[in-house]
Image: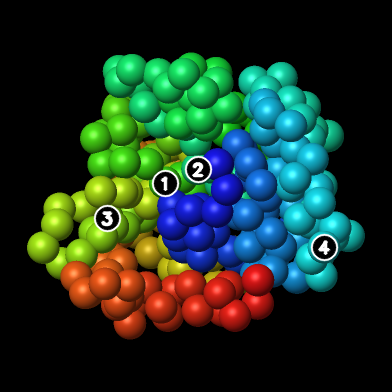
Amino acid sequence: MKVGTDGVLLGAWAAVQPQDRRMLDIGTGTGLIALMLAQRALEAHVTGVDIDDVGQARENAAASPWSGRVAFAQCPVQEFETPEPFDLIVSNPPFFVDSLTCPDRGRTAARHAVHLPFGDLRDAVLRLLAPGGRFAVILPTAEAERFLAVCAGRLALVRRTDVRTTPRRPAKRALMEFVRADRPAAPPADCSADRPAAPPADCSADRPADPPADCSAAVPEVSELVVGTGEHECYTPEYRALTRDFYLKF
């Protein structure tokens, strides 16, 4: 699998924050998404991992301006080890679950969840993600619902963008961002330690402390993106705005 719309969408859509220093691309393939992240986060180190040969990803990185900050490992993510967790993890994973496999073993590995079941992907993210980190993934809409069910109670959805190829077609892909479901929420501003005034009643010392907020109960931010106008090779302004810089620089 070379360069496709799914990878371009995820690489451009994933939220990159200024404090992110370590990023992981699971199922990196040709290194497309890893290189897009390196382009967007100029101080981050990006690692790509894939069960298949990563030689082409390494060639692509070596030919890019960001070769010193991108590295690749050929390894099943279930066995991948790292000394430090990642601030951002992304994946354009194999997704077909019940469909027939392709005779081409390479395409089967890239498209079918044979070597990377959704439960294994979830567990790898939980093992490798920093406490305050985020995980971004792109999946077909039906498989997205399967993945949400697998992640229930473990990873909490905080942002989702449904992608239509044209205005008249139903959504074909879902871009989703998750955090750990048990990640503690930041304390309210009026209860901060540096506030000189007496704390409000709901922060009084004789009141038992509230448990950490359950991120799984939060309402995710939901939006929609239309890629094409319906005319041949004519893209919407929203899609061009999201991906313009990458088309110019690659």
Please tell me whether mark 3 sits on a helix, a strand or a loop: strand
From where the camera sits, is residue 160 visible? Answer: yes
Residue at x-position 71% and y-position 43%: 48
Query: Which of the two residues, 207 or 50, is positioned nearer the viewer here?
Result: 50
Distance, label 2 to label 4, CA atoms, is: 23 Å
The amino acid type, in three-letter code, at marker 2 is: Asn
Label 4 – label 1 distance at C-alpha: 26 Å
Instruction: Identify the residue at the far left of this view.
Output: 168
On the image, numbered disc 2 is attached to which residue? 92
Marks 2/3: CA–CA distance: 15 Å
Say which residue label 4 marks: 63
Report the residue marked by disc 1: 138
How far apart are the two marked residues, 3 and 4, measured between alpha carbons? 33 Å
Observer-nearest residue: 184 or 242? Answer: 242
Q: In which quarter of the image is the N terminus?
A: top right
Q: Are marks 1 and 3 in contact (CB under 8 Å)?
A: no
Residue type highlighted by circle 4: Ala
Looking at the rendered image, the disc whose residue lies closer to the viewer, 3 or 4, is 4
